[in-house]
Image (cartoon, rainbow, N blue to C red):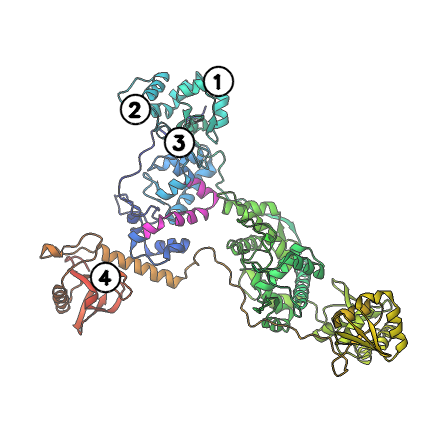
């Protein structure tokens, strides 16, 4: 068996004041002394180190702490410590986990032994950096001979019966025997050959000393049966708990009698920490990860090929988003009562886009994040394009793509979650309220950064990239959301055109570097064309993206048959009739095709337009409930005789008029299904143009991403916060003169208390002598603070002076000063 690194029992929690339960100081302590508390360690930091802490843990700034003691206290709260632990890399977290099972305080050599076992050179080299990270994060404090993990972090990471330690270690001998009868403890002491003691505390101490003595421990284990070693082997790396029967097997009984297994409950035993460490050779973890996994280029492509591939994807993305939003501008899908899009409408949209439901959900959420789609807020609430969509479609293609990509990168809405269930068992819907995941922007940007670190044109193996992300932010729980987010980012970046063939494109690199990607993308996109190629099979080929007027008209006149580098449109009787219903005459359609086709208009297409136009409007449908009129009474007789018209409830009112029970729209569809080409007419008998006005929502702003915790403060806020904390510390720690009367003595930590007359006299005297005083002050909002001021003027119920804690001249109302005290001669 290997020898353990721990040589004594676990020290008790320090009894010195620990103003925060968080940790460490990057700045150290005064020469020749060790900080006695976290507050003292933080106070020893310089301003740059204090600002670095506030930048790394911005939750400590809400609101700005009044002094270092408040900062230390806040840094030790459970929520703040959990957030800090969640942002550690794997080795820094393993270092914190090792400290949680080490003696408290822990000497550096002991911590090194727990992480290296005396053999792992990589872990030994990486330990100073990991420890510095923990100090910078205020999770560890103290000198190297007295390293201390903040108490809250120790409680979160140390093993317990209900929450096993990530190290797989169990409780110490002292912890495991806490509820054991003194007689039983003495029996274990005698069984391992130790002398009996007069009290259980000394007995536990003697037992701990045996288990942490490598030579005596090895001798004891040499006496164990072979089966006992197998039992220990199953528990040594965790979990350390095992079930036993009321009549255990001889190997288990042998281990239990000698304290190598201690009872945890009536039916479970636990392997003490000291025994496990001896068996492990002193290691806290079976495997350590001192270095981040590398992300090499798995494949290399020519950068020009990557950019061309990404540009093609970008062009397809623009077409898809535009088609999606336009399809909702006349009769968008309704908003569910609970918010979001129904499954049926999502399926319908996916069919329209010729995409899977997951892909359709992504495009819907992207358009929503970009502010192009929103709910209209009407009584019959529906989704519709926003006014911003009209501005967006008029932009050049490269600028339109930049708008989409800029909305995608910081978005917290996570489309791939659609269809899954939330914590209450409700299905998550597209555009629903529960799709925000605050970790998404960070993961998205980090994935792109790792891609950007590769040589241009290089694409990684996704598994190595995911391994790197898992090392940087290891999972501390059952959630694998970050790994799933990374998978989704790779897929979304490719389909959006941020990457091409798995490598970061030039426009994607510009997006990552906060540069406008439009100038890089524009040369890669084909110029819009103003013509099509008509073919004899009633199709038209668009050899590139069409200019807007041409594309809009052609979308009405023909149906899209296939998409890609060249879009194929097909002319059908229904599509031609749709153009006629929109108000185009046959002559207009012939002129349009002749103008925009580089090939002659095929005769079959000309015949199709003329044939549909000749029959279009021959029948007229209006509202009676509805009616049909036609100058050809024989045609009306033919309709009445057709069995397919039975459901329309037709009857002849006059030789040229049929009345119907069906609504006009139903009557129109019914007659068209029978092969006729009726047209709707107004009350005045004019043909109705069926072009509906495009519906727009009121002005809507794009959804704001949900941040993950407080935002990172800028340099100005950090500098102001550090000044405020230092100022509060000056006021809280300034040495005051002894008061003339005992009633004026201030209780430590409380504001000074003096009468109004004493306050006025003291500040007036200070103004005459130019000296500084210490005051307690309560502002108009009721917030109390301590200040060190040098009064220069006292008049009208106010005192004006230089505030040393704020580093500026301020005026204070005398009636809001709770008390005043003179400072010692060596103070400010």
User: What is the x, y in percent for residue 589?
Assistant: 80, 77
Q: Quadrant of residue 92?
A: top left
Q: Which of label 4 and label 3 is nearer to you?
A: 3
In the image, which is nearer the foreground, mark 2 or mark 4? 2
Q: Compared to 220, does 402 lie above or below?
A: below
The residue that disc 2 covers is 200
- Relative depth, front residue between 152 and 826: 152
Q: Quadrant of the N terminus?
A: top left
Which residue is disc 3 drawn over? 171
Q: Real-space Cα distance between discs 4 and 3?
A: 48 Å
Q: Which residues are magenta?
A: 71-96
Work out whether 232 lies above or below 705.
above
Which residue is identified by label 1?
Answer: 249
Tag 1 near tag 4, CB within 8 Å: no
Reply above or below: 126 against 277: below
User: Circle 4 is placed at which residue position?
Assistant: 787
Q: CA distance from mark 3 to mark 2?
A: 17 Å
Q: Return the disc, 4 or 3, that comes first in the chain's sequence.
A: 3
Residue 48 spot, x, y in % from top left: 35, 56
């Amino acid at each position: 068996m290997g020898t353990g690194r721990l040589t004594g029992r676990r020290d008790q929690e320090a009894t010195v004041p620990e103003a925060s339960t968080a940790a460490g100081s990057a700045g150290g302590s005064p020469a020749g002394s060790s900080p006695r508390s976290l507050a003292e360690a933080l106070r020893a930091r310089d301003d740059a180190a204090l600002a670095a802490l506030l930048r790394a843990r911005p939750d400590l700034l809400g609101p700005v702490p009044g002094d270092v003691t408040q900062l230390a206290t806040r840094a030790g709260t459970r929520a703040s410590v959990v957030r800090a632990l969640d942002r550690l890399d794997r080795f820094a977290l393993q270092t914190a986990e090792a400290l949680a099972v080490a003696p408290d305080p822990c000497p550096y050599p002991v911590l090194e032994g727990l992480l290296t076992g005396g053999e792992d050179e990589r872990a030994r080299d990486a330990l100073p950096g990991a420890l510095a990270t923990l100090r910078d994060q205020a999770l560890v404090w103290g000198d190297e001979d007295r390293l201390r993990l903040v108490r809250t972090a120790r409680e979160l990471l140390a093993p317990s019966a209900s929450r096993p330690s990530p190290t797989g270690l169990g409780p110490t001998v002292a912890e495991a025997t806490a509820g054991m009868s003194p007689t039983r403890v003495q029996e274990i002491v005698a069984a391992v050959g130790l002398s009996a003691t007069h009290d259980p505390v000394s007995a536990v101490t003697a037992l701990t000393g045996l288990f942490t003595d490598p030579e005596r421990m090895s001798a004891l284990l040499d006496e164990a049966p072979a089966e006992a070693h197998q039992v220990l082997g199953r528990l040594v790396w965790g979990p350390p708990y095992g079930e036993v029967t009321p009549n255990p097997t001889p190997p288990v009984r042998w281990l239990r009698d000698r304290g190598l297994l201690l009872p945890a409950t009536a039916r479970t035993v636990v392997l003490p920490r000291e025994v496990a460490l001896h068996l492990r050779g002193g290691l806290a973890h079976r495997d350590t990860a001192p270095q981040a996994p590398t992300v090499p280029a798995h494949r290399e492509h020519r950068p020009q090929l990557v950019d061309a591939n990404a540009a093609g994807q970008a062009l397809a993305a623009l077409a898809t988003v535009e088609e999606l939003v336009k399809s909702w501008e006349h009769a968008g899908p309704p908003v569910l009562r609970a918010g979001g899009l129904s499954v049926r409408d999502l399926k319908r949209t996916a069919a329209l886009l010729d995409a899977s439901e997951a892909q359709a959900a992504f495009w819907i959420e992207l358009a929503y994040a970009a502010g192009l789609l929103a709910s209209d807020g009407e009584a019959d609430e529906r989704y519709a394009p926003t006014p911003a969509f009209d501005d967006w479609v008029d932009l050049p293609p490269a600028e339109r793509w930049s708008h989409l990509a800029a909305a995608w990168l910081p978005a917290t809405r996570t489309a791939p979650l659609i269809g899954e269930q939330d914590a209450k068992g409700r299905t998550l819907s597209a555009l629903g309220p529960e799709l925000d995941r605050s970790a998404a922007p960070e993961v998205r940007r980090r994935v792109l950064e790792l891609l950007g670190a590769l040589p241009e044109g290089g694409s990684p193996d996704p598994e190595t990239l995911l391994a790197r992300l898992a090392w940087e932010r290891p999972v501390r729980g059952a959630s694998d959301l970050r790994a799933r987010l990374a998978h989704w980012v790779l897929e979304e970046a490719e389909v959006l055109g941020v990457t091409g063939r798995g490598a970061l494109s030039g426009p994607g690199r510009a997006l990552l570097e906060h540069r406008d990607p439009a100038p890089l993308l524009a040369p890669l996109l084909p110029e819009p064309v103003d013509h099509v190629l008509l073919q004899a099979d009633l199709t038209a080929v668009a050899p590139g993206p069409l200019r807007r007027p041409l594309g809009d008209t052609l979308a009405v006149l023909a149906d899209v048959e296939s998409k890609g580098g060249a879009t194929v449109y097909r002319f059908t009787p229904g599509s031609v009739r749709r153009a006629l219903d929109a108000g185009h005459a046959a002559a207009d359609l012939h002129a349009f095709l002749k103008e925009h086709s580089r090939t002659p208009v095929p005769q079959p297409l000309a015949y199709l337009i003329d044939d549909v136009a000749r029959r279009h409007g021959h029948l007229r449908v209006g509202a009676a409930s509805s009616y049909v009129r036609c100058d050809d009474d024989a045609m009306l007789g033919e309709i009445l005789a057709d069995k397919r018209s039975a459901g329309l409830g037709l009857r002849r009112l006059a030789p040229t008029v049929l009345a119907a029970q069906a609504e006009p729209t139903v009557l129109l569809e019914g007659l068209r299904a029978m092969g006729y080409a009726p047209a709707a007419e107004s009350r005045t008998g004019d043909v109705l143009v069926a072009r509906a006005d495009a519906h727009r929502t009121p002005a809507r702003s794009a959804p704001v991403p949900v941040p993950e915790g407080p935002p990172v403060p800028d340099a100005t806020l950090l500098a102001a916060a550090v000044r405020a904390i230092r100022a509060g510390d000056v006021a809280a720690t300034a040495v005051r003169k002894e008061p003339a009367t005992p009633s004026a003595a201030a209780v430590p930590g409380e504001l000074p208390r003096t009468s109004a007359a004493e306050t006025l006299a003291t500040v007036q005297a200070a103004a005459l002598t130019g000296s500084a005083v210490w005051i307690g002050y309560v502002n108009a909002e009721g917030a109390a603070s301590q200040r060190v001021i040098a009064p220069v003027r006292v008049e009208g119920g106010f005192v004006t002076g230089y505030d040393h804690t704020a580093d500026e001249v301020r005026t204070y109302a005398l009636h809001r000063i709770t008390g005043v005290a003179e400072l010692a001669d060596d103070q400010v």
